[in-house]
Image: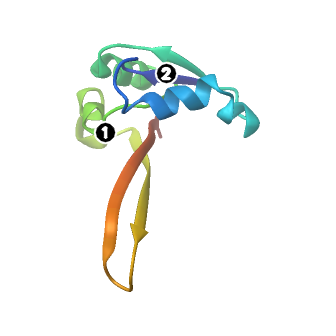
Amino acid sequence: MKLAIPDLISNSYFPALAAAELGFFEREGLDVTAELIFPVDRAYEALRDGAVDFVGGAAHGALAAFTEWRGVKLLGRWRRACTGFSSCARSSASRAGISRH
């Protein structure tokens, strides 16, 4: 599988790139290679055209290639660390990627 990364500078995409380069996907039984496709709009066009299988990039960029989200699925993971019964100390989200469907 090919994973498109829109840049190698932003720390936003680093987890996906690191996972591919350090063998995380391989340990999970997936053969994933990362490919730089800049800018993010071109990465989503590559996804739309079947050249890549996933994009590790900004979710809003998908609309450049997938009108009204038709043909694309947002994959994500929310993390939430809470203290006490109902108050949360912090909340963060990390994008896992976007894939065609």
Question: The residue tagged with tag 1: helix, strand or loop?
Answer: helix
Q: Residue at x 40, y 17 (%)?
A: 8
* Amino acid type of the residue that numbered disc 1 sits on in the rendered structure: Ala
55 displayed left or right of 45 = right
Residue at 24% over, 27% down: 64
Q: Is residue 24 above or below residue 39?
A: below
Q: Is disc 2 placed on a helix, strand or loop?
A: loop
Q: Are marks 2 and 1 in contact (CB under 8 Å)?
A: no
Residue 61 visible from this viewpoint: yes
Neighbourhood count class around disc 2 (C-alpha, 10 Å): few under 14, some 14–19, many 20 upward: few
Residue 89: image x %, image y %?
Answer: 33, 68
Total numbered labels placed on residues in the image: 2
For the residues marked 2 and 1, what is the alpha-carbon distance in whole angstroms? 18 Å
Q: Quadrant of the N terminus?
A: top right
Tell me which amino acid carries mark 2.
Gly
Question: Which residue does the image show at 75% across and 36% down from the upper left?
Answer: 27
Q: Is residue 101 left or right of residue 84?
A: right
Q: Dot 1 corresponds to which residue?
A: 59
Spot occupied by residue 57 in the image (x, y as percentages of width and height): 36, 31
Q: Is residue 70 left or right of residue 19?
A: left
The numbered mark at residue 50 is 2
